Amino acid sequence: GLPARVRIHEVGARDGLQNEKATVPTEIKAEFIHRLAAAGLTTIEATSFVHPKWVPQLADAEQLFPLVRELGAPDGTAALPVLVPNERGLDRALSLGASRIAVFASATESFAKANLNRTVDEALAMFEPVVARAKAQDAHVRGYLSMCFGDPWEGPVPLPQVVRVCRALRDMGCDELSLGDTIGVATPGHVTALLTALNEENIPTPSLAVHFHDTYGQALANTLAALQHGVTTVDASAGGLGGCPYAKSATGNLATEDLVWMLTGLGIDTGVDLGLLTATSVWMAEQLGRPSPSRTVRALSHK
Ligand code: HMG
Ligand code: MG
């Protein structure tokens, strides 16, 4: 069966904007996040405390994070997770009062090297003190796992290789795991196979989220497969913004509007106002100077 409610983990301001050539002004980012909260999104990934040379688009994290909190969500309840790769990033995030963080591992050696300048195991060792210290401060910790299905350099990724890193992230203390199809090559049968393998490893399905990129137009089909398997947290980016600067063939994430359209049709509650969300993505597309790739945004904003 399908869940009655799905929690959307909105990644447009982070996964989306990290991949834009143009650097979006801090005030526009803050307004974007504020509008996403006003549209009913309750988990909005705000930015990354990574090395500014690696992701210059998010180098304003110190300015943005306090500004977003100051503007506040309309009812002050939206959670604002941030990415941190190491203890330096954690220090930066905690000093600004972040209470939800995400580390980001890779299932493949090629991407671990490209994204974190580490082997898979060196990256896990880098995260260990981050997760321990965050948990000691009662922070919520998400563990991303990239390249769960295919890798641009290594091709299809064997399931046991993915399961091993999921196990390590769980054992480290991550509250939630987000299974990333970084380059968008997954198809629904592969999604079901991975979720089944994780069940066999006793990794609880409620602690899992799915993170699909829509490169081959499979993101919604993959999401449906995950929902049928019991997953209730889905990552998406408003307007379909996104990609990944260290994985060349990645295009945008599943568009939040496309997701909300499907879930609404299935009678699944998200708490999101599709009209307000679409207006936000149309506005952001104007800021970026190019139309949203989301089919739903285009259909609903067609004049
Ligand atoms: P490194 O070059 O190995 O860094 O990069 P290092 O540990 O050798 O440190 C070098 C210098 O950087 C030091 O300064 C550190 O203090 C500084 P120095 O002593 O030379 O003056 N430094 C920092 N400064 C600010 N903030 C920090 C920080 N860390 C070190 N946090 C590092 C290693 C991990 C830092 C680098 O590789 C990095 O920042 N990578 C981030 C890449 C990234 O953000 N990628 C995108 C997110 S992942 C993604 O999009 C996938 C996802 O969406 C899921 C999916 O789709 O699959 C999540
Ligand atoms: Mg991503």
Image (cartoon, grey):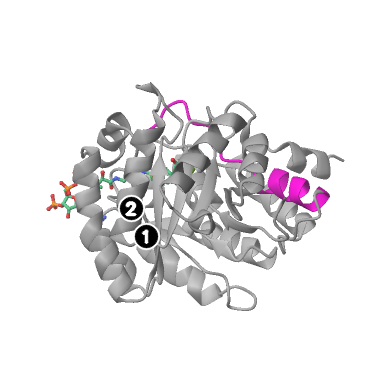
Of residues 207 and 76, the one nearer the viewer is: 207
In the depicted structure, whether residue 3 falls above or below residue 289: below
Name the residue furthest front.
Answer: 200
Are circles 2 and 1 on residues that touch, CB within 8 Å? yes
Tell me what residue is drawn at x 40 percent, y 36 percent: 245
The residue under the point 50% across, 69% down is 68
- Amino acid type of the residue that numbered disc 1 sits on in the rendered structure: Cys
Q: Secondary structure at mark 2?
A: helix
Q: Identify the magenta region.
A: 246-265
Which amino acid is tagged 2? Leu
Can residue 297 be seen from the camera position used here?
yes
Residue carrying label 2: 169
Q: Answer with mark 2 or mark 1, whichever residue precedes in sequence.
A: 2
Q: Secondary structure beneath disc 1?
A: loop
* Quarter holding residue 98: bottom left
Q: How many marks?
A: 2
Q: Percent from the top left, x then y, of residue 185?
A: 52, 27
Relative side of 25 to 257, left or right: left
**Mark 1, residue position:** 174
Q: Quadrant of the C terminus?
A: top right
Coordinates of residue 251 in the picture (x, y in percent): 53, 32
86 in the magenta segment: no
Could you say which quadrant of the image residue 93 lies in?
Answer: bottom left
Some atom of ligand 1 lies within 8 Å of the CB belonging to the residue at label 2: no
Where residue 202 is drawn, which disc sits there?
Answer: none
Q: Residues within 10 Å of mark 2 (few under 14, many from 20)?
A: many
